[in-house]
Image (tube, rainbow, N blue to C red):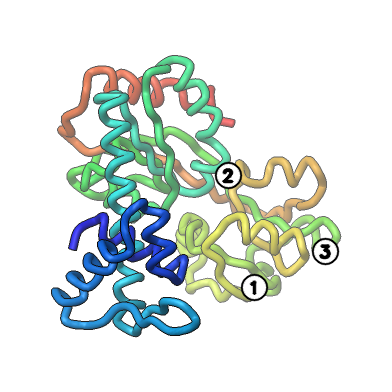
Amino acid sequence: MNLETLKLFLDIAALKSISKAANTAHITQSALSQQIKSWENSLGTELLQRSNKGTQLTESGLIAHKYAVQICKLYDEMMMEMEQQLKHGSHQLSIYAIPEVCNYALPCTMYEMKKQFPDYLITLNEGPSTLIEEQILMEEANIGFISGPSAHPELSSCKVLLDRVMLVSGSNTLRPDKIKLNELSRFPLIWSAQLSCVQRALNEIMEDKPKLNILYNLDSIEAVKLAAIKGHGAAFLPYMSIRRELRGKQLRIIHIDNFQVYNEIHLIKKKNQRCHHDTRQLIRYIEKSLPDTVC
């Protein structure tokens, strides 16, 4: 079995015909049949079943198809990455960031970065803080932006942004403009585990573990924001993610007496990581210019 056989097998499955797949690949039907038969012999099972309805996948064929898709996809990704490496050489920078930073802060910074370093291929990916730390440790990314400082001894961490997290609700929802902290439990909340800074702040200020009326948890900050706009409940959201909705009066702030939450955004990188001189310069540029270039 080789990659060519896998791709031909996928063609047969898509076209439901060996002859059509052979014509598409510009080979004879017998040659293609021999390749598939040889692969079936090595696996010890039939992958294809011929009938008047065309060529169908057997149960073993369905399993083979699932993994053939993954293998071919990984191969294409490998070739693309190698092509980019040949094209850009060492001029690549991979960034991972928590969703609010990835989606609302860094796009403008990336635009400025590209103007200053036009030869660089810069990629930006989102994920939770724990995943970002793993990516940096495995050197799958050059730098990351996480919530709070990293406690890992192999990572350096410095605070680069401070974003206030606010309690908001839909503008058409009947809610008071100001409440006391002990009244928070009366409000139905849409929660996001990504904003762990809110839970930490509540735990620090309240003697007993706060009892909150959490309707449901959502992974996506965008989903939480939409639910709040629709009036499903109140929600804690980062200011950088709701500026437009506050200006457009889709959301309004519920102020909490003597309680404010700030999300500290830290830039992390692996200590003693070897990288190109120009890459170090680019990272220094990000550290220095970030407060002035965020969206």
Query: Mark 2 or 1, which is nearer the eye?
Result: 2
> Which x, y percent locates residue 170?
78, 59
Asked if 14 appears above or below 139 in the picture, the reply is: below
Q: Earlier in the sequence, mark 1 or mark 3?
A: 3
Q: Residues within 10 Å of mark 1 (few under 14, many from 20)?
A: few
Q: Quadrant of the C terminus?
A: top right
Q: Is residue 248 above or below residue 88?
A: below
Q: Nearer the viewer, mark 3 or mark 2?
A: 3
Measured as percent of width and height from the top left, residue 78 is found at: 28, 45
273 lies above or below 63: above
Among the 4 quarters of the image, the one containing residue 269: top left
Q: Which residue is mark 3?
A: 173
Q: Which residue is mark 2?
A: 164
Which label was assigned to residue 185? 1
Q: CA distance from mark 2 to mark 1?
A: 21 Å
Residue type at the position of mark 3: Thr
Residue 206 pos. (x, y %): 51, 66
| Vertical order, 13 against 147 (above or below) | below
Amino acid residing under circle 2: Arg
